[in-house]
Amino acid sequence: MTAQVLDGEAAAAARRAELRQRVDALVERGITPGLGTLLVGDDGPSQRYVAMKHQDATDLGLHAVDVRLPATASQDEVDDAVRALNADPAVDAFILQYPFPPGLDYLRAITCMDPAKDADGLHPHNLGLAVMGEEGPLACTPAGIVALLEHHGVEVEGRHVVVVGRGLTIGRPLANLLALKRPGCNAAVTVVHTGVADVGEHTRRADIVVMAAGSPGLLTADMVRPGAAVVAAGVSFVDGKVVSDVDDGVAAVAGWLSPRVGGVGPMTRIMLLSNTVAAAERAAR
């Protein structure tokens, strides 16, 4: 068996076409949706991610606002920059690029954000709405994973999904989202992590495995039920290279597998744009 590819580029392109129509409708009303980013410090990967997000926004016809602070910025300066983005009428939604330099409190900064302008879906207010199943911006990577599976016709409802990883940006919000009674979800969800003695005991029983542990090569072929769908969302940097949580041998066993490049990444970015366009639409009501 050779796994079919969960192609994030193709799924994102389909979602982008739908977003383009919504952006055009706003522009016809004299409204250009605006995405803002706040980058603190000079972390190389973060700089690249921000550049990609701005290019995505520009390609879709959005206005992009790029705010940067040095690594020496104080917490008060960061918080003030967040409040300035809250007040900027040209910005409908924005992100705080993670990670922050040492000594700065990301949670404190994000709680300064106007929840209505939360493009990442990680403000405590919006995470609470998600837990309640209410409307609001969803965390981008979890929403992107659900959309990726849906685009490729991978059945989730009523299936057993094992999420490996319990982080704030993927594991916890994804587990909550998949368990909700909504299209593309409504699954039986198990959350495990690297503190579990035998991760494979759980993943071998899963119809769908989502790896989000940030542990290189953690999931091996013997830990996957033949034909299962595997989503590789977790990566690490090893000797300057991006390494997946999923060992290459899994492709010979899984029915579906997202690639390290062109899998989850494009879906995270398109959901960021989706949250921004939705914020513009809410503001225009």
Image: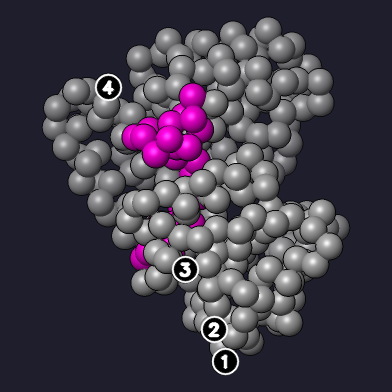
Marks 3 and 2 sit apart, C-alpha to C-alpha, by 13 Å
Q: Residue furthest bottom?
A: 1
Secondary structure under the numbered disc 2 in the rendered image: loop
Nearest to N terminus: mark 4 or mark 2 = 2
- Mark toward the start of the polypeptide (4 vs 3): 3
Residue in front for this viewpoint, 211 or 8: 211
- Label drawn at residue 159: 3
Indicate yes or no whether the magenta region holds residue 150: yes
Q: Earlier in the sequence, mark 1 or mark 2?
A: 1
Q: Is residue 219 left or right of residue 238?
A: left
C-alpha gap between disc 1 and disc 3:
21 Å
Judging by the rendered image, the residue that carries numbered circle 4 is 283
How far across and down, in percent of the image, does residue 44 sit?
Answer: 72, 41
Nearer the observer: mark 4 or 2; the answer is 2
Q: CA distance from mark 4 to mark 2?
A: 44 Å
Is residue 186 magenta-colored?
A: no
Which residue is the site of mark 2? 227
Q: Secondary structure at mark 4?
A: helix
Which is more N-terminal, label 3 or label 1?
Answer: 1
Name which residue lies at 62% across and 49% down: 171
Callout 3 secondary element: loop
Residue beneath disc 1: 1
Residue 269 at x, y percent in the picture: 48, 47
